[in-house]
Image: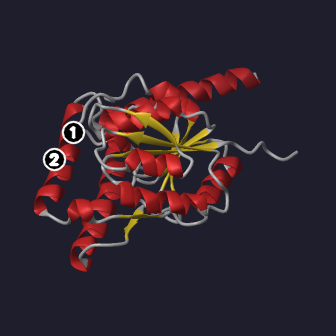
Amino acid sequence: MRPEVPTITVVIPALDDAEMLRRSLGDLATQLRPADEIIVVDNGSTDDTAAVARAAGARVLEQPVRGIWPAAATGYDAATGDIIARIDADSRPPVDWLLHIEAEFVDAPEIGVLTGPGVFYDGNPFVAGLGQVLYIGGYFWSMEIWLGHPPIFGSNFAMRREVWADARSRVHRDLREVHDDLDLAFHLDPGVIVRYDERLTVGISARPFSTWHGFGRRLSWAFGTLWMHLPEESPWRRRAARRRWREEHAEDATGAVA
C-alpha cells in the first residue's frame, strides 16, 4: 500500500521585495512537484509586493507588526498543508525542491523537520564566500553542538503542521530582533526529529552580508537569541531533557510489548 502523499504549503515572509519575490514565485511555478498552497505574508510593504504575490496566484496575508517572526508565524498559522515549507522573498528554490521535501517526508515518517543549507547566488564573491563558510557553515556546526540536533535554517526548511501546532505557543513569535529559525529549534518537543540534508539546497541572496552593519546585526540577533534561552536551554539541560524523553518512551514501549 502506497503511503499517502502530503499536501504542502509554502510560506514566504516579504517586506518591500517585489522584484526578488517575482523571481522566487517564478521558481515555485516551475517546480516538478507544485505547491498545494503558497502564502505570502506582506509585512507592511510600500512597494508592489502584495500585487506581485497575487498575480502569481499566492494567498496574501497582512502582518503590520514588523519582523520576520511575526510575519512567518502568521503564515504558519494560516497554512492548510500537511507540510509547511519556508523560503524567503529573495530565495531561489531549485526545480526539485518541493519534490525532494515530499520524498523525504514520505520515505521517513519519523521526521518532524527537514532543513538544508543556502548557497549564495549574488554579491561580492569574497563576501559571499565568507558568509558561506563562517555564517552558514558556522551556524550549522555550532548550533548542532548546542541544540543536540541540527538547527533549522529559516530560508530553507519544512516541518509537519503538527510540529508547528505544538510549538507555536512557546516561541517568541512577537519579538522582532530574534532569529526565528533558532528560536523555533529551541522550542521543539524533545521527541521531534530534525534532519539536515546537504542535498536540499536553496539559492539565497548575499545582500544581508554586503555591509558590516548587516552582518553584525544578524550576529547580534543570534547571540541575543542564545542569551534569552539561558539557562533553561543550555546544552547540558537540553541533552538531559532529550535523554529523559528517550528513557520514558523506551519504558512505554517496553510496557506496551509486555
Identify the residue at horizontal 65%, vertical 58% (top origin): 99
Helix, strand or loop under label 2? helix
Q: Earlier in the sequence, mark 1 or mark 2?
A: 1
Snapshot quadrant of residue 236: top left
* Left or right for 97, reference 177: right
In the picture of the structure, the residue carrying the numbered disc 2 is: 220
Residue at the image position 32 percent from the left and 41 percent from the top: 68
Quick one: which residue is furthest to the bottom in this view?
125
Q: Does the residue at mark 1 contact the one at mark 2 (Cβ under 8 Å)?
A: yes
Q: Residue furthest right?
A: 1
Percent position of residue 48, x then y: 37, 50
Front in this rendered view, residue 71 or 115: 71
**Mark 1 neighbour density, 10 Å: few (under 14) some (14–19) many (20 or more):** some
**What amino acid type should be assigned to the residue bearing mark 1?**
Glu
Nearer mark to the viewer, of 1 and 2: 1
Residue picked out by circle 1: 177
Q: Quadrant of the N terminus?
A: top right
Helix, strand or loop at label 1? It is loop
Q: Whole-percent x and y of residue 30?
A: 61, 63
Q: Quadrant of residue 33?
A: bottom right
Quarter of the rendering containing residue 66: top left
